[in-house]
Amino acid sequence: MTDTLPAHTTTRSDETWWRQASVYQIYPRSFADANGDGIGDLPGITERVLYLASLGIEAVWLSPFYPSALADGGYDVDDYRDVDPRLGTLDDFDAMVSALHAAGIRVIVDIVPNHTSDRHAWFRQALASPAGSPERDRYVFRDGTGEHGEQAPADWVSIFGGPAWTAVGDGQWYLHSFATEQPDLNWANREVRDDFLHTLRFWSDRGVDGFRIDVAHGLSKDLGDVLPTWAELSAMPKDGSHPLWDRDDVHEIYAEWRQVFDEYTPARTAVAEAWVAADRRARYASAEGLGQAFNFDLLEADFDAGAFRSIIEFNLGLAEQSGSSTTWVFSNHDVVRHATRYALPPRTGDEKQGGAWLLAGGSQDVLDQQLGLRRARAATMLELALPGSAYLYQGEELGLQEVGDIPDAERQDPAFFRNPGVDVGRDGCRVPLPWTRSGPSFGFGTGGAHLPQPAWFGDCSVEAEDTDPGSTLNLYRKALGLRGQLQSEEHLEWLETGRDDVLAFRRPNGWTSVTVFTDVPYDLPAGELLLASAPVADGALTGVGTVWLRA
Ligand code: GLC
Ligand code: CA
């Protein structure tokens, strides 16, 4: 493995580093396990800093590492200002941040403000206190219906399936938009607001550079005195006045957060995870608010030139409106990996990509893995040439496929347990990474892996790919390295390609990217060939792939 650090294009004092950063998402409990208990940990990340540096990324984003029962993989937080003892200590956190910073890598942590876990001190206090108490006011409690409150206040369904209200035994019920273990907070409560300002300062003071805000479109709620039915709720427009989602007044919260971010030099950054209509995204990305928002449009699209082009044009336009930069994502811890989505037969309807395949057993045999990987490599190179930030997910640099056939008995995701026969859940993209060709848990740790790794993982391991010049790992390294050198102003100019299955664009400094979406060879325009995701012969890209040229 390489033992030198690549040059970085920004300095730590740069206020605009986030605008075009490549950010690598670490799902800590599945990254590397330093103490051999089967769960990835913070020292495991610190031990792999050279690997992260060898990728040429500018920042890491860590999914939650806070104390948690892991009812939702850590998105059920017991204490926002500590480290889960299974993942390390605050000292381990500080050591990790120092090591990453020394390697020129910034650190983004995940903030989960819509809900705490049911083990959070506040929720325990709420349960121990009577209806109408200040302790209950930090959450969303309502009286049940029926004579003794034995029926739920409303028939609402949680995002993971199953009821969204749970009884606490005294006639009251609490709202949980996600799992039962994730009670929603009441953001109308000043104490809740102040506590999160405290948390943002706590991590900022420890040197954290930015925050990823979970379910940023949740938080603010206005349920009124009479709760609507689920059918009524579902039919209400999400125009800023919906009782639960994407309310206009949620931005008052982020305006307060912005003041905290701006107390620091450089200002701390934030990116919103807000699953809202595209035309409402800009509010989250505004400079008075979080500053940037995820755009999941490419992640949700099929591998199709026309779809990609309109998504890119639309989002560059939105970014101009908000003054933010745009973001691109193909994979994260919530979706089927893109190498696998692109290996599946075409979708017939609107279903979630990979959903039907997972329900049918998730067999690798029905995938065209080779095609999926060629498309994924092409898509990533296209993404990395676009203006804006690119968010990459651990394992995609290895070309990893989704693990579709995890036995039911080993699944962990509440989406699986709460939605039998409808949703298989997200465990298949959370299987611990393979570091070595063989050995226990493929080098993840000495104590096994908390989700089963398939035999084929060894061939996609870091060890197997590190020295293979044609590997996906080395493609990512070269592409990220070049991106650092070639980065240009946040514009692109589309080039005429003469074909509707080919997209080509040029950045202001001449950096040109050409993507062929089918296996029909394509004669490349003139220019110095910098990198190709697929073979180039006689000046033509031979099939699905992306090439970068300097023109
Ligand atoms: C976000 C996270 C997801 C989590 C959910 C509830 O969507 O990305 O993993 O389950 O929020 O916190
Ligand atoms: Ca461990």
Image (cartoon, rainbow, N blue to C red):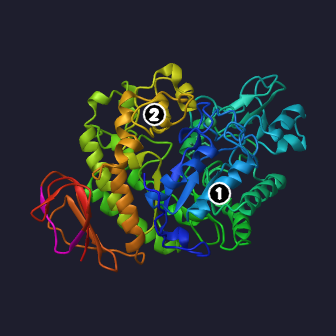
Amino acid at circle 2 = Phe
Q: Quadrant of residue 495?
A: bottom left
Please indicate whether residue 229 sits to the left or right of residue 370 in the image. right
Q: Which amino acid, mark 1?
A: Val
Q: Which mark is residue 442?
A: 2
Instruction: Name the spot of residue 134 as percent of width and height, x first.
Output: 89, 44
Q: Which quadrant is the C terminus positioned in?
A: bottom left
Image coordinates for residue 522, horizontal then vertical, percent:
13, 61
SS for dot 2: helix
Furthest residue toward left: 538
Instruction: Identify which residue, 498 or 92, lies in the foreground.
Output: 92
Q: Residue at x 28, y 43 (%)?
A: 372
Q: Is residue 158 above or below residue 240?
A: above
Decide: is 339 above or below 169.
below
* Residue 185 location (% of width, % of height): 74, 45
Q: Is residue 311 visible?
A: no
Quadrant of the picture in which ligand 1 is shown: top right
Residue found 65% across the figure and 59% down from its top: 98
Furthest residue in direction top, as rendered: 409
Q: Which residue is mark 1?
A: 97
Vertical comparison of 56 with 420: above or below: below
Instruction: Decide which of tag 2 and tag 1 comes sooner along the chain.
Output: 1
